[in-house]
Image: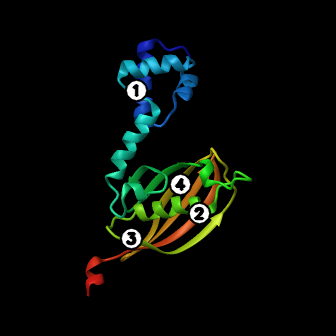
Amino acid sequence: MAYDPKQRREQLKEILTINPFLPDRRLARHFDVSVQTVRLDRLALGIPGQRTRTKEVAERVYEKVRAMGQLEVVGELIDLELGKSAISIMEVTPEMAFQRTGITRSQYIFAQADSLAICVIDAENVVTGIANLKFKRQAGVGEKLIAKAQVIREKGSKSVVLVETRSRGELVFRGKFLVFALDERRDQD
């Protein structure tokens, strides 16, 4: 379907409002135009590039986190609804993988999931008590790991958080975390 420039720009604006993480090359395929045309349309609309859009969304999300600082979160936090769900993305770098095989070291996948399980809790001081982990497949350098956390049960200061990490649509990791929101007043007694 051929779009006139005005119509294409309106649709581009709508699409990026819904999903600000879409890269220009994917938008170009959607509209059947060149990547340069998409860039020019974005510039005309005052819409920044994908990296800037992702950073802006992440900054808004990090403001909600209560249990840890922005630098303590492993991966890039892109969505957070305290007490309910959270999403982070982490691209596997060569430093995260075994040099000989390029396979991601498990501690990085665990750290992303654990920090996400802590972030989703609406409390100032949260720790992991128990974690039941299942690594389902290997991930390699360059893969983007998308971790999604969901609070599945709460009772008092205890919460069970399910975290699933996927790459290329495939399940890489699944973990259930029993996390505790610590009451600072109890610590002072």
**Where is mark 1, residue-wise?**
13
Residue at the image point whose x is 48% and y is 56% from the top: 74
Q: Position of residue 70 (x, y in %)?
A: 38, 54
Residue at the image point whose x is 25% and y is 80% from the top: 185
| Residue found at the very far right of the displayed protein | 100
Earlier sequence position, callout 4 versus callout 3: 3
- For the residues marked 4 and 3, what is the alpha-carbon distance in whole angstroms? 19 Å
- For the residues marked 1 and 3, what is the alpha-carbon distance in whole angstroms? 39 Å
**Where is mark 2, residue-wise?**
107
- For the residues marked 2 and 1, what is the alpha-carbon distance in whole angstroms? 39 Å
Residue type at mark 2 is: Gln
Quadrant of the rendered image containing residue 126:
bottom left
Earlier sequence position, callout 2 versus callout 1: 1
Q: Secondary structure at mark 4?
A: strand
Q: Residues within 10 Å of mark 1 (few under 14, many from 20)?
A: some
**Where is mark 3, residue-wise?**
126
Q: Position of residue 137 (x, y in %)?
A: 69, 57
- For the residues marked 4 and 2, what is the alpha-carbon distance in whole angstroms? 14 Å
Q: Which mark is residue 70?
A: none
Q: Secondary structure at mark 3?
A: strand
The structure's colour scheme is rainbow
Q: Is residue 4 visible?
A: yes
Q: Residues within 10 Å of mark 3 (few under 14, many from 20)?
A: many
Where does the C terminus fall, quadrant-wise? bottom left
| Residue found at the very far bottom of the displayed protein | 189
Q: Position of residue 110 (x, y in %)?
A: 56, 63
**Where is mark 4, residue-wise?**
147
